[in-house]
Amino acid sequence: MSGLFAGYVPGHPILRGVDLTAQSGRITVVLGPNGAGKSTLLKTAAGFLVPLRGSVMLGDTDIGHLPAHRHIALGIGLLPQGRSTFPDLSVYENIELGGWSMRSDRKRLAAAVEAVLTRYPHLRELRHRAAGSLSGGQQRAVEIARMLVPDPTVLLVDEPSVGLSPIVARQVYQELRALKAEGRTILLVDQDVRAAIAIADYVYVLGSGRNDVEGDRSAFEGDLGAMVRGWLGV
Ligand SMILES: Nc1ncnc2c1ncn2[C@@H]1O[C@H](COP(=O)(O)OP(=O)(O)OP(=O)(O)O)[C@@H](O)[C@H]1O
């Protein structure tokens, strides 16, 4: 992303000149206080918000003005903040929704869901259950599975551990590491500074609508990490 301006109300951009690169096959973390614009950044990268200025590049292509379904087709997946399962639908139906763009090709869609269920056998066992009857951790697993149905190469992940127990949160971060090990690119925004820095390759800090501090994980593990936690009050 370069020189990115984006927001919700004309004349009041939330992002005001963000310059950020998510390196291929790496985990890039964006930290920042509440309301800094982290979710706005991911929504823009996912095609739900059109940039007011600046570009969102995927390789050599500016995808900033493409609608969200084109982003999915280009291999970009979003794990949104908060609970996003449909509680009355079954686990299977929730996961299947991740393949909405393939809905006209039932065979391909079924194969893609099958691949995800093979990856997460515990979800296969739960596939007939209503998503709303599952624990928070199980629902997060459904959301991750749903994101993976189109086999995205770029994952946009928004505060994945909010509301989860420490053990389940650890599993979520382990899964992000596993997804990176498969060669996927991850852009993670998080309030859990310690957990996010622990899996990061590169870290940006967002404040006042633009990125101000950045560096490799090593730079954030020492004093700078303490400084950032101080800024964020965590
Ligand atoms: N749909 C919306 N319409 C109008 N303003 C919004 C909308 N969503 C977010 N905002 C505003 O944009 C600003 C940035 O919000 P955003 O959710 O991107 O921040 P954040 O860094 O992700 O914070 P948090 O961690 O609290 O989610 C906030 O002032 C918020 O009130």
Image (cartoon, rainbow, N blue to C red):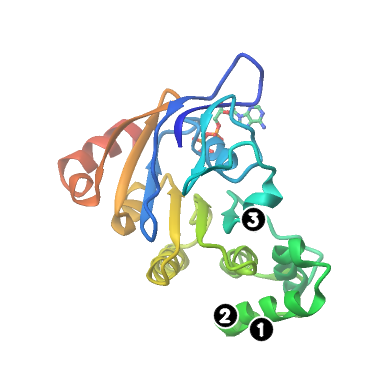
Q: In terms of secondary structure, where does tag 2 sit?
A: loop
At label 1, the amino acid type is Arg
Residue drawn at (68%, 55%), measured in percent from left and top?
Answer: 84
Q: In terms of secondary structure, where does tag 1 sit?
A: helix
Q: Determine whether label 2 and label 3 are within 8 Å by CB.
A: no
Q: Which residue is mark 2?
A: 120
Crowd class of label 2 (few under 14; some 14 to 19; many from 20; radius 10 Å): some
The disc label shown at residue 72, or none: 3
Picture layout, residue 109 above or below residue 122: above
Residue drawn at (27%, 34%), measured in percent from left and top?
Answer: 230
Residue positioned most to the left? 223
- Spatial distance from mark 1 to mark 3, Cα to Cα? 24 Å
Crowd class of label 1 (few under 14; some 14 to 19; many from 20; radius 10 Å): some
Q: Determine whether label 1 and label 3 are within 8 Å by CB.
A: no
The disc label shown at residue 27, or none: none
- Spatial distance from mark 2 to mark 3, Cα to Cα? 21 Å
- Spatial distance from mark 1 to mark 2, Cα to Cα? 7 Å
Question: Which numbered disc flags the more N-terminal residue, 1 or 3?
Answer: 3
Q: Which of the 4 image quarters holds residue 124?
A: bottom right
Q: Determine whether label 1 and label 2 are within 8 Å by CB.
A: yes
Picture layout, residue 9 above or below residue 93: above
